[in-house]
Image: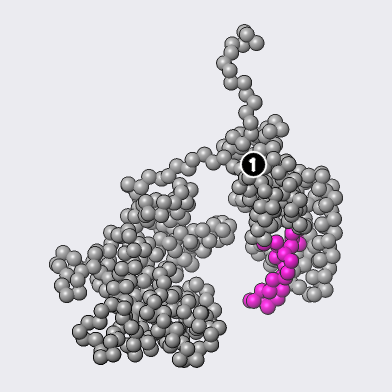
Amino acid sequence: MLPIPSALQEQFGEYLRNKAIPNSLQGAYKKWLRYYLDFCRKYNFSPTHKESLPHFIRKLQEKKQTKVQQDQAVMTVTLYYEILESKVLPNKEPAPQTASPQGYSPFNYEKYFSIREAAARPIQYKKVIPPLSRDSAPSTSVHSSSHTVSPSGKGYVEQGTGASWKAEYSRLEDEIHVRHYSSKTLKTYKGWVRKFQTFTLSKTPGLLSSNDVKEFLTFLVVKRKVSSATQNQAFNALLFFYRHVLHKEFGEIDGVVRAKQKPYIPVVLSREEIETVLKFLEPPYDLVVKLLYGCGLRLFECLGLRVHCMNFDAGILTVHDGKGQKDRTVPLPETILPELREHLESLKDLHQRDLKRKYAGVFLVNALEQKYKNAAKEFIWQWFFPAKQLTYENKAGEYRRYHLHGTHVQKAIKEAVSKSRICKRASCHTFRHSFASHLLQANYDIRTIQELLGHSDVRTTMIYKHTIKSLTIKEARSPLDF
């Protein structure tokens, strides 16, 4: 995001003080002005014309900004227009001969945005033709039926840019939900589509072609220098967007080579290092880590456990709706069974307190609550790692219980690893890697480890063969010499 020109920033601050705007709000007003100028830069609106304000407010609505924030943004832009109309912005450049006697002239926004745009985005898109001089008329070859002058006067751009993709985002959400993909997949795909929209200058979706994808992927690799995994993630997101939202195929994308991911060797902690990390963890985070390592769970699988997932009699933990909407069972570690039972008793006390507070129950997946009306308040459906506080649901106007947030666990593990002074890059998923590596080191069958981890393909599990020391005799000898 580009900074506000110093001349404008000084004049705007003085104007806010003259308007008796409280000091506590002046920072917010300057923030909204910066957002507005950046919006005009991204979507080719002139910052000196009021026609851009409705588009700016529509963008705030798409960003889920509150009514108070929208009103504050409107007030900010209104004050900014008053400054433009007063024509009292000091120009840092030499004043032209037609300047007013006071030595002031309107700030040269056109030149400012063209210079900063060239510095921030050195890559030239094929659909943008270099700007011509204002004094010279466009040539016949440039001024054709397929191009028009951009609102900011920066040059000639292809018709069909600046369109709204709101309907496409709505269809993208529908296509993700109908396939029961995770919320993280939706967030990731929407993020890449939004970046693609910005890259194409909000080109009309019906005019998008495979060349746009080719240019975008090339830009990511050449200019942004993203990794192969990031490039492939962007490719998959746009492939889904084209195929299921726009209902068109990529076709042949010549000139862009799909990056091949290099073999990744995961970080593995030893038993001593895991015990050291556990010493710096407080409940319930220590119990979460013990299940991550002792059962080989992913973080979202562990936090999504409910009371009925624990079968203490059989010593089995059932994972429902794991990655890929798959269920599996893993053995419960016998060493932590007393700790798990004690934690279960504390959940019973918490459940009774919630019932006395007349809460609406826990959050349930899909339409389960419609099928079982009282399931949200039943003890077996309570989270095994509940959140510390109740969550207020605005639509229903009631309090519900959510599970422990993943970021809290990640932060606790990061601090514990830092305090333990382990010279390894460890995270929540490291304990799952350690689970698989230690089982393989104990000579467990690779197929058994595959089932415990919930991998669809054994090739995914085979990567853990690189995390343990090889005990194979590699010296070539004849069997007759044994």
Residue 405 highlighted magenta (yes or no): yes
Structure colour scheme:
one colour
Q: Quick one: 211 or 93, which is closer to the camera? A: 93
Residue 191 belongs to magenta span: no
Q: Which residue is mark 1?
A: 268
Quadrant hosting residue 342: bottom right
Magenta stretch, residue numbers = 381-406
**Nearer to me, 146 or 333:** 333
SS type, badge 1: loop
Q: Residue at (17%, 70%) from the top-left corner?
A: 138
In which quadrant of the rendered image does the N terminus lie?
bottom left
Q: Main secondary structure of the magenta part?
A: loop
Seen at 32% across and 73% down, the residue is 112
The image quarter containing residue 432 is top right
Side of 337 relative to 83 (left or right): right
Side of 147 where 217 appears, left or right: right
Between 156 and 457, which is closer to the camera in this rendering?
A: 156
Q: Amino acid at mark 1?
A: Val
Furthest residue in direction top, as rendered:
480
Give the quarter of the figure containing the C terminus.
top right
Residue 239 position, x and y percent, is 43, 53
Q: Is residue 331 visible?
A: yes
Image quarter of residue 472: top right
Q: Is residue 319 above or below residue 401?
A: above
Pointer 1 local density, CA inside 10 Å: few below 14, some 14–19, many at least 20:
many
Where is residue 83? Give x, y as percent: 37, 87
Residue 413 in view of the camera = no
Residue at 81% x, 66% y: name it: 351
Q: Position of residue 221 (x, y in %)?
A: 39, 51
Residue 50: where, in percent of width, then height? 36, 83
The answer to whether residue 241 is above or below residue 151 is above
Residue at position x 78%, y 52% in the image: 310
